[in-house]
Image: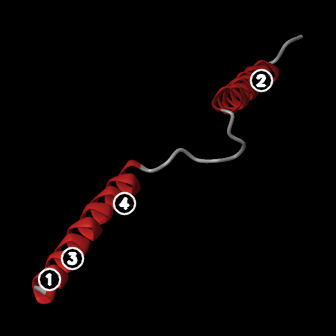
Amino acid sequence: MVTGAAQRGRGRWKKAKSRRKLEKVAKNQERNTMAANGSVGCDPPDKLLLSALKYWEVERDLIEERLAMRSAAAAS
């Protein structure tokens, strides 16, 4: 004879299996992505970080130009 408790237990087991299956699929996709990128355990570069680096590179170039202009003016 089947009881209500046994059916509920079986339902929980199915949910657990489906969760494990989703985790397994996610893990496989992560491996495939890393293999396609050729990277091993590296995060993609942060857009904000790249933007800040470009900004400071431009600032540095401007400062160097101003110093060069002052040096040239002082030498004249």
**67 over 16 or under it: above or below:** below
Q: Secondary structure at mark 3?
A: helix
Check disc 4: other Cα within 10 Å, few if <14, some if 14-19, many if 20+.
few
Residue at (75%, 27%) from the top-left corner? Answer: 24
Determine the residue positioned at 79% across, 20% down: 10
State the residue position of label 1. 70
Q: Which mark is residue 17?
A: 2
> Disc 2 versus disc 3: distance between alpha carbons?
68 Å
Tag of residue 53:
4
Query: Which circle's residue, 1 or 2, is located before the other in the chain?
Result: 2
Identify the secondary structure beneath mark 1: helix
Pick whichever, 67 or 6, lies toward us. 67
Query: Label for residue 68?
Result: 3
Q: Residue furthest right?
A: 1
Q: In this rendering, would 20 be left or right of 62?
A: right
- Residue 11: image location, x then y, percent: 73, 20
Q: In the image, 71: left or right of 12?
A: left
